[in-house]
Image: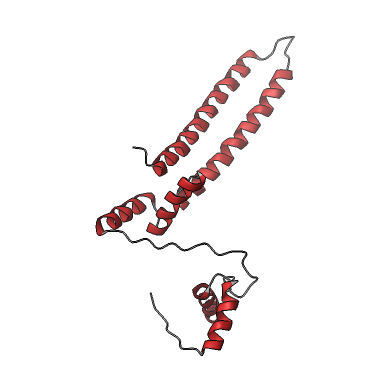
Amino acid sequence: MALFNVRLDDDLAGRFDAWASRRGGRSASLRGLMSAACEGVTTGATGSPRCSRPEKLTVRLSERDAAGMQAEAVSRGLTPNAWAAAVLRRRLSGRPTFPPAERAVLIALHGEVHRVGVNVNQIARALNTAVVEGRVLDLELGYLDDLRRELRGHMGAMREAFEGNLAYWDGAP
């Protein structure tokens, strides 16, 4: 990765820092300006001011701890910084953290299973009102109950995935 060093007079540097502080900071603003100049793409650095900037935390680790953190981060598909932030986020707010690929799959899967469940409920209502010569369609209702049980099993598996994720971040074995 390239590093640019630029010398500016103190007044210009102060004014730029004031402007950039509302847009993600000095580095983010410079990257956005460079991107816009070279590619015609804006990254928000020239747009509206941001509400707040995340806090930055610097932690010094022994080589052994750093290697362990690197290995854990790689195993979860995260950067070491994202992994450390996830540990803190879990401890402070109880929120789970999934790697981006897992998160996208789980969100899509949850949506699909939910939609199927809604359709099953609609079918159940229709079958409950259907009458053939005075009898409810028992065989069809049995199939529907089997499908409901299967969907509950899939939802349980998703819940277990979330619980496993939470247990990982809690440090449970």
Q: Position of residue 149 (x, y in %)?
A: 54, 23
Q: Position of residue 76 (x, y in %)?
A: 38, 49
Residue 116 lies left or right of residue 98; in this view the side is right
Badge count: 0
At 44% from the left and 40% from the top, the residue drawn is 166
Q: Furthest-left residue in view?
A: 64
At 70% from the left and 10% from the top, the residue drawn is 135
Q: Furthest-bottom residue in view?
A: 9
Picture quadrant where residue 146 is located: top right
148 or 45, which is in the foreground?
Answer: 45
Q: Position of residue 62 (x, y in %)?
A: 27, 58
Residue 104 lies left or right of residue 2; in this view the side is right
Picture quadrant where residue 111 is located: top right
How did the renderer colour the structure? secondary structure
5 or 150, which is in the foreground?
Answer: 5
Residue 148 lies left or right of residue 56; in this view the side is right
55 or 106, which is in the foreground?
Answer: 55
Q: Is residue 92 visible?
A: yes
Position of the C terminus, as image quadrant, is top left
At 63% from the left and 13% from the top, the residue drawn is 138
Q: Position of residue 9 (x, y in %)?
A: 51, 90
Q: Is 103 above or below relative to 159?
A: below
Q: Is 6 above or below relative to 135?
A: below
Picture quadrant where residue 81 is located: bottom left
Q: Is residue 97 visible?
A: no
Q: Is 150 above or below relative to 110?
A: above
Position of the N terminus, as image quadrant, is bottom left
